[in-house]
Amino acid sequence: MIKVNENYLKIQPSYLFSEIARRVSSFQKENPDVEICRLGIGDVTLPLPRACIDVFHKAVDEMADESTFRGYGPEQGYGFLREKIAREDFQSRGADISPDEIFVSDGAKCDVGNIQEIFASDIKVAIPDPVYPVYLDTNVMAGRAGSFHKGRYDGIVYLDCTGENGYLPDLPKEHAGLIYLCFPNNPTGATITREGLTRWVEYARENKALILYDAAYEAFIGDKDLPRSIYEIDDAREVAIEFRSYSKTAGFTGVRCAYTVVPKECRAYTERNEKQLLHGLWNRRQSTKTNGVSYPVQRAAEAVYCQEGKAQVRELIAYYMRNADLIRKEMTGLGFDCTGGENSPYIWVDVREDSWAMFDTLLRKGGVVCTPGAGFGRCGEGHIRISAFNSFQNVQKALKRIRDLFTPGAKTQARRE
Ligand SMILES: *Cc1c(COP(=O)(O)O)cnc(C)c1O
């Protein structure tokens, strides 16, 4: 008899994006002449930087010629890319990371989902709420969660992020071995200061814990005082693994390129309390299960670090951040408490009512799509996420409709354009 992994039967179905799609399409059917503005998207809308496209084409042509053709690449990724990553993303900011500590991959989603394989199945895992759902679901699949009731799994340490703590999780009250942190955060847009992050590094050192630091949105940090990498914090090398991606930074969501940093000193412990370094384990896991990212894609990612590439990436980010700034100002002006939108492409709005009810109001009366906070965890209830990934024109249009909706006396009907 072939048996299934019953942990998969425990996972709560993810209604969020299918339910959004269902409600939008039924509204559109009833109101075919309303032009819908989508501010629910967690995907970029602008094309790849020119510098990336040019070398991407060139690298494809190299594959057509026997003298420049490349087969399987080096397991951790090409040296040309890892050297630039180490220098530009870390050493230039005073973070001591070397090229052989970088593992290039086809996405931060898979890395952040796969990394838990190298840890024991009976560890305690601490996960922020609300947050990117991959952390929780992959640990449920691995058997680290008990039964599910009232919106939560037994056995998981949830780190509540609410208005009271400024959407920054407090240190866990019960011991946790593996801790997920994501800054700038998806969905709240919250960022963490150097002092705040130092407390987590100290906690991990004192409690023999490990931090998984998801920095997929670091490129959106404009504030010079905020850390962009956890390795900017002293002594983090031993206690933290960091995840980065070109997806949101440079429009690679459809191209696929990311990387994970596992410093040489980074450690966990064996059953007998002996220190075990993780670099070799992750290397073994990756070289066993993947052959990495294609040569042209790694060349395209490398172009992010050339002079034109850097300027073009800065422009992409500035474009989205202009949207974010407008959204945050407008929503704040309407009397909503907001976080994010500064140093982050997401604006997290406290709507003080059921998040799906607010979703329906914005959709049915304004023709605007947002993401209901409840889809990201129990603490997401009462909030919506508005995304800056859209054209400036669409953002302006959506905000005008929201303003009309919440300004007394303004007309409260879906606008027909
Ligand atoms: C988008 C996103 C990622 C990763 O994306 P990839 O496209 O798989 O590199 C990782 N973490 C968070 C929080 C994200 O929002």
Image (cartoon, rainbow, N blue to C red):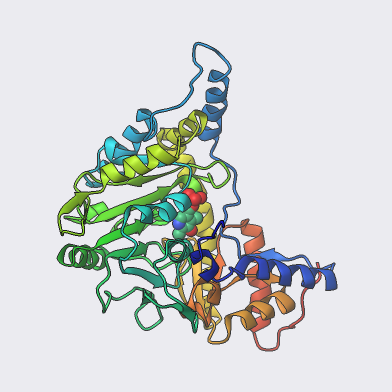
In-front residue for pair 281/109: 281
Whole-percent x, y for residue 201 in the image: 21, 62
Asked if residue 415 lies left or right of residue 185, the reply is right
Residue sitting at 47 percent across and 30 percent down?
299
In-front residue for pair 5/226: 5
Whole-percent x, y for residue 320 in the image: 53, 56
In-front residue for pair 119/127: 119
Residue sitting at 32 percent across and 33 percent down?
83
Can residue 31 be seen from the camera position used here?
no
Quadrant of image for the N terminus: bottom right
Whole-percent x, y for residue 336 in the image: 51, 81
Can residue 410 be seen from the camera position used here?
yes
Residue sitting at 68 percent across and 81 percent down?
361
Residue sitting at 55 percent across and 73 percent down?
375
Q: Is residue 232 above or below residue 92?
A: below
Quadrant of image for the C terminus: bottom right
Q: Residue furthest top?
A: 67
Q: Is residue 272 above or below residue 365?
A: above
Q: In which image quadrant can residue 14 be found?
A: bottom right
